Amino acid sequence: MNTFSTPWTQVYDPLHWWPLSTLVAAIPVVVLFYLLAVRGTRPHWAAMISAGAAITLATAVFTMPLQMSAMSFVFGAAFGLKIAWIVIAAIFLYDISVFTGQFEIMKDSVAAISQDRRLQALLIAFAFGAFVEGCAGFGAPVAISGAFMIGLGFDPFYAAVLNLIANTAPVAWGSIGTPIHTLAAVTGLNESDLSAMAGRILPFTSVIVPIWLVRVMSSTRATLEVMPAILVCGVSFAITQFVWSNYVDSNLVDIVSAAACIVAMLIFLRFWQPKNIWRFEKDQVTAARNHNYTRGQIARARVLRAWMPFAVLTVFVLLWGLPSIKNTLNRATTPSFAVTLPDGKPRPGPPGWDVPMLHGQVYRDKPVVTDRAPEAARYDFNWLTMTGTAAFLAAIVSGLLLGLSPAQLIKIFGGTLKRMRFAVLAIVCMLGLGFVTRYSGMDAVLGLAFTRTGWLFPFFGTFLGWLGVALTGSDTSSNALFGSLQRITAQQLNIDPVLMAAANSAGGVMGKMVDAQSIVVATAATNQVGSEGKILRAVIWHSIALAAIVGLIVMLFAYVFTSAVPHGLDFVK
């Protein structure tokens, strides 16, 4: 037991009038969005100021002891380093590809498929981005795909916006199914049922998002011109997403769906191309000077060599995601991974070191949880099995295979660190802010406001998931925060808890494009640090509209197609 502080129970209505308590709990989030979207404040400063407001309110209004609120920020910042490590490693891999000239060949191979910007966006932002999301998640798709699209000649602003919009439908199964695994753990519901339910909600958006993506970058007429390709892209992804999530497992949904989508697109585009090659106005002038690449002009061996770093990345990330490998490496390299108690039994709960003044000292209470229970606060510094380490090792191996010397790799990595320094600081501060709102209970106060919507709860409960991701930057974290609350509220309102728990994750994916962490990653990857507010203003309404669509789908499952909610599936072994 942690003995550094006295246990403290979260207070969900400190001002004794829930609307006012909710408004106060929203202040840190409002300050963050105001600083980013209105004032144009640098993201790391905006996060630090908002975190300061959160710590102050947590202590002064929500009665959380100051040392606890401060430690929650430190804990979140430390967790943020693990997220930043993924982004750094992904950009490092990209920088190696650029330095060795392989990226030019990759661009040529994509141009040989189609020089149409609409189709390139579908292939890179949606399909390839979904593949990276399934492997790594946590900002890596936006980082890698955004940098890729700029290399293809996309305007940096559009590259950031398009990748943020595209990185939605796959997020529920990102990083080898981590969000669904977490949702099952916190709700106690069957993981197979949760995966299947999410796989019955999100395929609809998997068809909508590609249409939305192309419409954002072009006119309605231009969108209709490539509707056959859009449908091939969206439908192939959606069908595979549904089948795999309902009948196979919850681990490889994104990877298999993205692979099916890419293969379907490549086959289709061999026989069909739009009548007009569409490009942005800015690159119309240079379009005539571009090569008219054909598949025969690019040696297959050169293309395979150019894409090799990303194949190596896939292998490493998949291996790192296997429990047998991850657990073995953790026990060998992280002493606190497995702790034996004095009675000889293994310590229950998540692995890691107990965070002083926080672990087991903060209690959640009714109605957020069924019974008063302590919050875990363990920092698992699994340095070798972090997803970022897998990407970093993939970058090293790829660089050596491409003929780079250790000295050259060190130089490239130094350049990556220099370019990413402010983005890393912003990510760290954003996660610190998110953890303050989590451990102080302010996130729960905001969530409880959604539970007061009665029969409309299926719609607004979906937005509860959206809020969780917008606050924390992670569908996994949103499920950890609100999964139990969704189940409790659903049971009180006689709504299927499997549906509402899955709705938390499904609605959360649409909040991914507006969370500060993703926007910071997008600006860092596209060399637009300082444009966070502009990008936030550009994507906020798309995020809300798509979340509303998900909410309506959930409403239909709640009141019309109730028999379609799965129960008792057992495909996850």
Image (cartoon, helix red, strand yellow):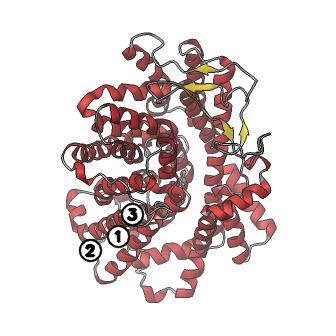
The label nearer to you, 3 versus 1, is: 3
Q: Is residue 29 visible?
A: no
Residue 267 in the image, given as x and y percentages of width and height: 35, 81
How far, Cα to Cα, is label 1 from label 2?
Answer: 8 Å
| Left or right, residue 272 beside residue 179 | left
Sequence-earlier tag: 1 or 2:
1
Q: Name the residue at 77% across, 61% down.
A: 410
Which quadrant of the figure has residue 497? top left
Residue 332: horizontal and vertical position, in percent?
79, 58
- Please rate how many residues cluster around mark 3, counting C-alpha atoms within 10 Å: few if below 14, some from 14 to 19, many from 20: many
Q: Is residue 187 left or right of residue 502?
A: right
Vertical placement of residue 358 versus 176, above or below: above
Q: Amino acid at mark 1?
A: Asp
User: Is 268 situated above or below 227?
Assistant: below
Q: Measuring 37% from the left and 40% from the top, which residue is drawn there?
A: 540
Q: Are marks 3 and 1 in contact (CB under 8 Å)?
A: no
Q: Label 3, label 1: how many angstroms apart (C-alpha)?
A: 9 Å
> What number is the disc on residue 121?
3
Sequence-first disc among 3 and 1: 1
Q: Determine the secondary structure under disc 1.
A: loop
Q: Pick the residue in front: 218 or 261.
A: 261
What label sits on residue 274 in the rendered view?
A: 2
Question: Farthest residue in the top direction?
Answer: 16
SS category of the residue bearing label 2: loop
Query: Does dot 3 land on a helix, a strand or a loop?
Result: helix
Pointers 1 and 2 in contact (C-beta within 8 Å): yes
- Residue farthest front in this picture: 343
